[in-house]
Image (cartoon, helix red, strand yellow):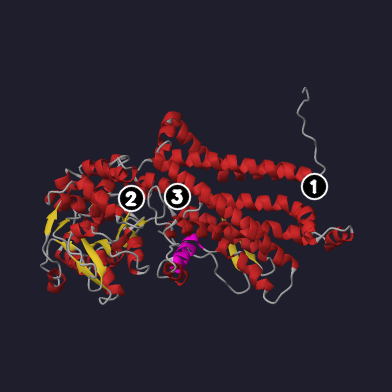
Amino acid sequence: MALAFRLQKSPMPGFGLGMGITLAMLSLIVILPVGALLARGISYGPEAVWATINTPRVWAALYLSFRLAFLAALVNLVFGTLLAWVLARYDFPGRRLVDALVDLPFALPTAVAGIALTALYAPNGVFGSIVRDLGGKIAYTQWGILIALIFVGLPFVTRTVQPVIAEIEQEVEEASATLGAGRFHTLRRVILPLLLPAALIGFALSLARAVGEYGSVIFIAGNLPMKTEIAPLLIVIKLEEFDYDGAAAIGIAMLLISFAMLLAINLIQIWSRRRIGHV
Amino acid sequence: MTRIVPATDNPTAGGRSICARGAQGSRCRRAGPAAPGLRRIAAIVVSLVGLGLAGPVHADNSLLNVSYDPTRELYREVNAAFAAKWQAEGHAAPTIETSHGGSGAQARSVIDGLKAQVVTLALASDIDQIASRGLLPEDWQSRLPHNSAPYTSTIVFLVREGNPKGIQDWGDLVKEGVEVITPNPKTSGGARWNYLAAWAWAQKNGQDPKGFVTELFKHVPVLDSGARGSTTTFTQREIGDVLLAWENEAYLALNELGEDRFDIVVPSVSILAEPPVAIVDKNIADDEQKALADAYLAFLYSPEGQALAYKHYYRAWDDSAANPEDVARFPQLDLVTIADFGSWKQAQPEHFGDGGTFDQIYSGQ
């Protein structure tokens, strides 16, 4: 295309200043640290980075981190959406309280969350002792990690979906009903498509949060190599060995996998938006 | 470590003066109560400037001691006692700050630019790492007596009250059904001493040491990242039958959590853990600060400092001023030293480095 790139002057004033501040902040807060990580990897050399990543233990940790983060985000997608629906659609005593509770995982220091969850789910804890009597174990297994990841990721789906639900007019459902659709049909063909883009954003945020989560998981995981060792812990272990390059290599691996997953989710989201027109 | 910046909130009647010192001298403006937004912005700006300035403003009679986790209680008392002594010798009151954390992480902060004049860490290899970046000479460990370790400790077993599993020695740890709690040797200095002590016992008892530690770690259900984390897992979560712990940490657990809940078992062989101290030469501002740092470390070796170490369950060297009760509680046992493993420069990569014997346990090589 032989189109010359030309800035169209926006009728809104303040573009130059706004864009300048945005770029400066973005560079300082996001691009510089990520750039430093990549620069470290480049100076280490692609072969060395690959050699660090391509070991059974690193693969096991990466697989564990991404698999559990994905599962936790899926759980949050379903229950977060349900929670948002209940909060947006029904009025019940204590609704505002529940609404405020949703944000707690954001506010609580993750270490506190991890210690509290461990105390509950350890074999001598309130829930843990019940499970122990049934012959199971939650804390110090992958189940414990999953619970911690669900906890930290829950608000993302609820908070992205809730305003969308609040905006869907009740009339839309009534129209669907008058046209002869059953409740399930209305939910599947009318409501869910409207919610999908927002829910996907929530899913992506929840996933991204869970992949990088360290503080809460470390207390409940047990941290056994090849079994319950998450990828962020491997990075910390590399740092403890003063192996900055090795730590950067695993960091880059996580960055690339996360980027690929988020890109895929964004593509699905664009596709779903196209399908239903707009939201 | 946190630095507290003097609060900018100084409520005067009806408002607050904001002063800007320019080339023309100082201009002051009195902000009225009517502009809360502006005042907040001004307060933030002043705080930010304060944060920026807080760094370099550091009097020379101050020290930052970067230490590891279980020394909190010890250095709280040492700092107070040393400050009193230093003043009694006719000097100005010193400001001594202490920062605590995992030994490796603390060493990294110093490497990455934390201006610590004194480091008191769990392992010589962590200070070796700082030395390898040129912050202090490579032969730092020979500058002070006893390999620069003013106090030592060892590794003992903490078991549940009455010792239900009958654990007496290292060999009992790999019995059927025994669960052992230890932190991860990769992330915890204390855990490296645990590991080497187990290795030494196996060597002395005609077992294959690598086979023994491999078997031992099959009995470990949880690997915490630090010594305090493992103590919590064992004492609060009630996981495991035996905790491999610093002797001082084990006594602390007994004292804090009740002597009726746990017993200390002393194995036949253990390791002499020498947590070393050193001055970080490159972070010393001037002669005055050097004198203060020297005196601070010398105090640790003085009868008074040694008595404090005994009091906090460390095995020190000079018991002339110590409470005899504090000294008598340490049982005698066969202690190997890091010299039996060559040195930390040798043992660290061989056992705990990338692909070392600890990694091999879990990769099954």
Question: Of all residues shown, which one is farthest toward the right?
Answer: A178
**x, y percent for residue B144:** 17, 51
Distance from Cα at disc 3 to Cα at disc 1? 39 Å
Query: Which residue lies under the disc numbered 1?
Result: A278
Query: Which residue lies under the disc numbered 3?
Result: A230
Q: Secondary structure at mark 3?
A: loop
* Residue B104, disc: 2
Q: Amino acid at mark 1?
A: His
Marks 3 and 2: which is nearer the front? 3
Q: Secondary structure at mark 1?
A: loop
Q: Nearer the viewer, residue A17 or B194?
A: B194
Marks 2 and 1: which is nearer the front? 1
Q: From where the camera sits, is residue B94 visible?
A: no
Query: Dot 3: within a 10 Å radius of its alpha carbon, few (fewer than 14), some, or many (20 or more) residues?
Result: many
**x, y percent for residue A200:** 67, 50
Residue occupying the point 73% across, 65% down: A88
> Looking at the image, is mark 3 or mark 1 earlier in the sequence?
3
* Residue B196, disc: none
Q: Amino acid at mark 2?
A: Gly
**x, y percent for residue B307:** 17, 67
